[in-house]
Amino acid sequence: MPQRKKILPLKQVYQIKVSLKNIRPPIWRRLLVTSDTTLPRFHMIIQNAMGWQNGHEHVFEIEKMEFGVNDPYDPTSPKDETKIRLSKIVNREGQRFKYIYDYGDYWEHEVLVEKILPLGKGESYPQCIKGKRACPPEDVGGPPGYQDLIEALESPEETDNVELLDIVEDDWDPDHFDLSEANEMLTAV
């Protein structure tokens, strides 16, 4: 009996909103990514669109399972993400999962599948189509440290944490987001 060919689904585009949790006002990016995107590539898309530096470990938490860089000698390490495509884990609009970056600072991102769209003719992906606010600096101490930084920037003469001000450039603006810069960074993915 001849072996049947595996039928691959048509490639789709996911409109995804990636939001940092435990931060007010919100910091987020709206992305367009193809359904055949692997989790390692999606990790880099999030890194570049958000403005992270990819200096720490990450993990995806999807339906009570963890995917990330697997250590075969550690039974508690996440499942290997390398061959997992978004199409294997995304099955509906409105689906949510977590992306955690930097276990020390513990930046938790909510990943929301807003829309599942047909592939656009002549379009290149990934794309960032919208976003709000600058990415927090690396190693600032997670959401509590970020809040301390914002307070120090608002009242530098009153802060007890002068060293926090050294983390950012003098012209760093937490309210600034540059869409064209985010998309330029995505061309490297």
Image (cartoon, rainbow, N blue to C red):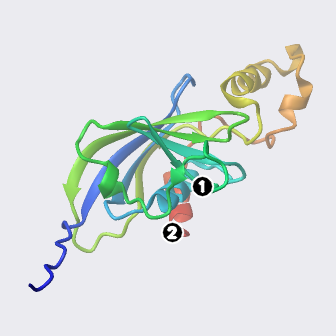
Q: Which element type, helix, strand or loop, lies under badge 2?
A: loop
Q: Please say if 181 is above or below 97.
A: below
- The nearer-to-camera label among 1 and 2 is 1
Residue 183 visible to an observer of this rendering: no
The x, y position of residue 104, in whole percent, is: 73, 35
Residue 134 visible to an observer of this rendering: yes
Q: CA–CA distance between discs 1 and 2?
A: 23 Å
Give 127 or 74, whichever is nearer the viewer: 74
The image quadrant that residue 161 belongs to is top right
The image quadrant that residue 106 belongs to is top right
Q: Extreme front residue here?
A: 1
Q: Extreme top residue here?
A: 158
Q: Which residue is mark 1?
A: 69
Image quarter where the N terminus lies is bottom left
Q: Earlier in the sequence, mark 1 or mark 2?
A: 1
* Mark carried by residue 187: 2
Q: Which element type, helix, strand or loop, lies under badge 1?
A: loop
The x, y position of residue 58, in whole percent, is: 61, 47
Specify whether 136 is left or right of 1.
right
Residue at 30% over, 69% down: 123
Give 130 or 125, whichever is nearer the viewer: 125
Q: Residues within 10 Å of mark 2 (few under 14, many from 20)?
A: few
Residue at 64% over, 55% down: 71
Specify whether 158 is left or right of 62.
right
The x, y position of residue 76, in whole percent, is: 61, 42
Q: Amino acid at mark 1?
A: Val
Q: Residues within 10 Å of mark 1 (few under 14, many from 20)?
A: some
The x, y position of residue 155, in whole percent, is: 80, 18
Specify whether 161 is left or right of 83.
right
